[in-house]
Amino acid sequence: MLVRGFASDNNAGIHPKVLEAVINANKGHRIGYGNDEITAKVVQKFKKLFGAQVDVYLVFTGTAANVLGLSTFAKPYNAVICAETSHLHADECGAPEKFGNFKLLTVPTTDGKITVEQIKTQVHGIGDEHHIQPKAISITQATEYGTVYSVEELAKISGYARENNLFVHMDGARIANAAASLGWENLRPAFQAGCVDVLSFGGTKNGIIGGEAVVFFSKQPDFKFIRKQGMQLASKMRFISAQFQALLRDDLWLENAKHSNRMAAMLADGIRKIPAAQIAQKVEANAVFCIMPNNLIRRLEEEYFFYTWREIDETKKEVRLMTSFDTEESDIERFLKLAEDDWD
Ligand SMILES: Cc1ncc(COP(=O)(O)O)c(C=O)c1O
């Protein structure tokens, strides 16, 4: 399917600057396994972004970033508290349990976010050898529902975590979209508040070919062993690094995310004008969840692929529409025109 649609931000292509960086890295020979100068430069770029104390490791996938990042803190008798809708729980095929070797304790959510009150329901039996020992909280920013934790919400969760000796993991597959939404031009102050211990910093959904960064906010020298044993040490690391070099240069990561968020806002504005459709979640990043009648969905599906999230009743469903760095205004106009024409 060549049409630029709204199925997912990972259906998008590669940003030209990223592709160019990969081509530039494709010269001569360089030492493998991350012992090359491009990787060294990327690590410095991450330090510039987050502060000199961070420890950064590149991996292939977001699932690996989440699972390996968390497994640094969680032992086999530990649990990680997360939303039932989190990618970690819903979309990682049990990798946390199999490869991370820790249990997940989930809490319900209607908008992808979790609260301290909900987290508390899972924090009990501490010190009791019969009970799984909660060790970390995992939150997704921006969430799987396109919503974004506010600074205050983050502070409450991290405050609770500190008081209860829990680590905080942030699944930031879309941290760029969250930063754009919150007006974080500079990530350093946001993260220096000590709100997070380990962040999965997404690249794949924001214009690169593939790769994610595991960013620890304190030194984690053992992670190099965890990454290798976890099968995520790229021998030709320079090509993952080159992509991040381009993404972090001149804040391309933020520019891409600002654009995709703006496109989502535009899409949501258009959908609000369609009488039969109804926006189902706050549109705070690059996802638009909306409820549409089945006949309209069928008509749109003739030309576009997108995901149906859940059935509301026999006449309508909730669908997820996502924008990406390469969405153009004309893509949205075309989609909305089809929706409006069908409705009229
Ligand atoms: C919230 C979230 N976290 C992590 C991921 C990373 O997934 P993958 O392992 O496919 O790179 C995704 C991808 O869909 C995601 O939506």
Image (cartoon, rainbow, N blue to C red):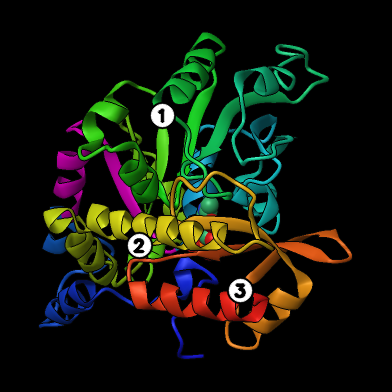
Callout 3 touching callout 2 (CB < 8 Å): no
Q: Nearer the observer, disc 3 or disc 2?
A: 3
Viewer-proximal residue among 278 and 183: 278
Residue 328 found in image quarter: bottom left
What amino acid does circle 3 point to?
A: Phe
Callout 2 touching callout 1 (CB < 8 Å): no
What amino acid does circle 2 point to?
A: Asn
Left or right, 46 with respect to 13, comes to left
Q: Secondary structure at mark 3?
A: loop
Residue 125 found in image quarter: top right
Where's residue 52, x and y in %? 17, 33
Residue at the top extreme of this rendering: 163
Viewer-proximal residue among 220 and 335: 335
> How many C-alpha atoms fall within 10 Å of the one at disc 2: few (<14), some, or many (≥20)?
many
Q: Secondary structure at mark 2?
A: helix
Lower position in the chain sequence, tag 3 or tag 1: 1
Residue 281 visible in the snapshot: yes
Residue at the right extreme of this rendering: 314
Residue corresponding to mark 1: 196
| Vertical arrangement, residue 82 with respect to residue 224, above or below | above
Q: Nearer the observer, disc 2 or disc 1?
A: 2
> How many C-alpha atoms fall within 10 Å of the one at disc 3: few (<14), some, or many (≥20)?
some
Q: Which mark is residue 92?
A: none
Viewer-proximal residue among 293 and 261: 293
Residue 36 visible in the snapshot: no
